[in-house]
Image (cartoon, helix red, strand yellow):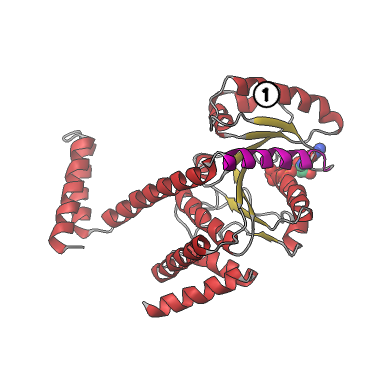
Amino acid sequence: GTATSSKSAQLAEQLEQGSRYALAKSITLVESSRSDHRALAQELLSTVLKRQKESKDAKPTFRIGLSGSPGVGKSTFIEAFGMYLLEQGHKVAVLAVDPSSSRTGGSILGDKTRMTELSRADDAYVRPSPSRGTLGGVSDVARNTNEAIILCEAAGYDVTLVETVGVGQSETMVAEMVDMFVLLVGPGGGDELQGLKKGIVELSDMVIVNKADGKLEDAARSAAMDYTSAIKFLQSPSPLWKAKVVRVSSRNNIGIDKSWEIMKSYFDTMTAAHKLAEKRGAQRKVWMWRQITSELVDRLNGDENVKKHVAKLESQVFDGKMTSGQAADSVVDVFLNKVKENKI
Ligand code: GDP
């Protein structure tokens, strides 16, 4: 209604003035499970996107995903890299997709105090992981983050880092919300190259071998060589770009500038070929379908007729009297018939 529109217009205004308070509040709305909050959040997002489209002097924005196993040095890297970007005149936002923050207890990313220096900087915004247990599954957390990126950009943060841990689907989902996906690995060498992790290397536009310092320097050099030769045989995420490997010591601030140089070269290559806008458009379509799927399943699960019907079918499927496929068809039919009758 109009109350919602004026509230969202006011928030959009405050966001554009760079208010951290408005940004925190807006992201909280996006993360909320309350339907009035979500409605306001959607209104806000559409206001912000419209204004961005209309504005002529919009700064280019760069979304970078960063993944790696726990302990590999993600927060140390982000602290050093973020401070470097601030020196270069950028405004930096850091968001996290923590697959462990939903449903269950322990958070992999969130518990310790992370990136303390960056968190205090005026031109940086470090969003703490969403509070635990208040959200749905990984895909809900990821969807919220995807929307939070837009809000950060509206508030003037031109580089957004989205951090995640190498667990389950979270890496794929982060890769689907950023311009460039970066994998951070340790000097221990190729465990990421085997089996399951090969798929993650394949998603990556850049591999950072961290902890390339002191006693670990030789190991880091040989790990970097392993990744470089492995990448030759892997499919690239984009035909215009072959993944680059770089050695970094986040602790000693070595290779941070080189990392940014590579990222900028990726950005320039993709922008010059008009591939970045195309990628973002395709990503928006992916997220639209994700949302359709989850919305439909939610509505189906909330339907009383379906509930009754499902209880019967489940026991028949359990007993082997009906195939899973037949039962699924039947549930969907019952749901759609009800939708037609009530004209929802
Ligand atoms: P995260 O779990 O991936 O965020 O990893 P952290 O940033 O918390 O780092 C895990 C451990 O590795 C900490 O003890 C860091 O001090 C250490 N570490 C991080 N970066 C480096 C580095 O470049 N060199 C060395 N030697 N240690 C590092």
Q: Position of residue 300 (x, y in %)?
A: 26, 54
**Taking 328 as reference, is 141 left or right?**
right
Q: Secondary structure at mark 1?
A: helix
Q: Nearer the viewer, residue 213 or 86?
A: 86
Q: Residues within 10 Å of mark 1 (few under 14, many from 20)?
A: some
Quick check: is 267 in the magenta stretch?
yes
Counting the numbered discs, the total is 1
Q: Position of residue 295 (x, y in %)?
A: 34, 55
- The magenta span reads 253-272
Whether residue 181 is visible: yes
**Taking 37 as reference, is 171 left or right?**
right
Whether residue 68 is visible: no
Q: Position of residue 49 (x, y in %)?
A: 48, 61
* Rendered image quadrant of residue 234: top right
- Mark 1 sits on what residue? 228
Q: Main secondary structure of the magenta part?
A: helix
Identify the residue at image location x=63%, y=59%: 127
* Rendered image quadrant of residue 110: bottom right
Q: Amino acid at mark 1?
A: Thr
- The answer to whether residue 205 is above or below residue 53 is above
Quarter of image, ligand 1:
top right
| Image quarter in which the C terminus is found | bottom left
Q: Nearer the viewer, residue 323 or 271?
A: 271
Identify the residue at image location x=76%, y=62%: 121
**Taking 12 as reference, is 248 left or right?**
right
- The answer to whether residue 10 is above or below residue 193 is below
| Image quarter in which the N terminus is found | bottom left
Q: Position of residue 291 (x, y in %)?
A: 38, 52
* Rendered image quadrant of residue 131: bottom right
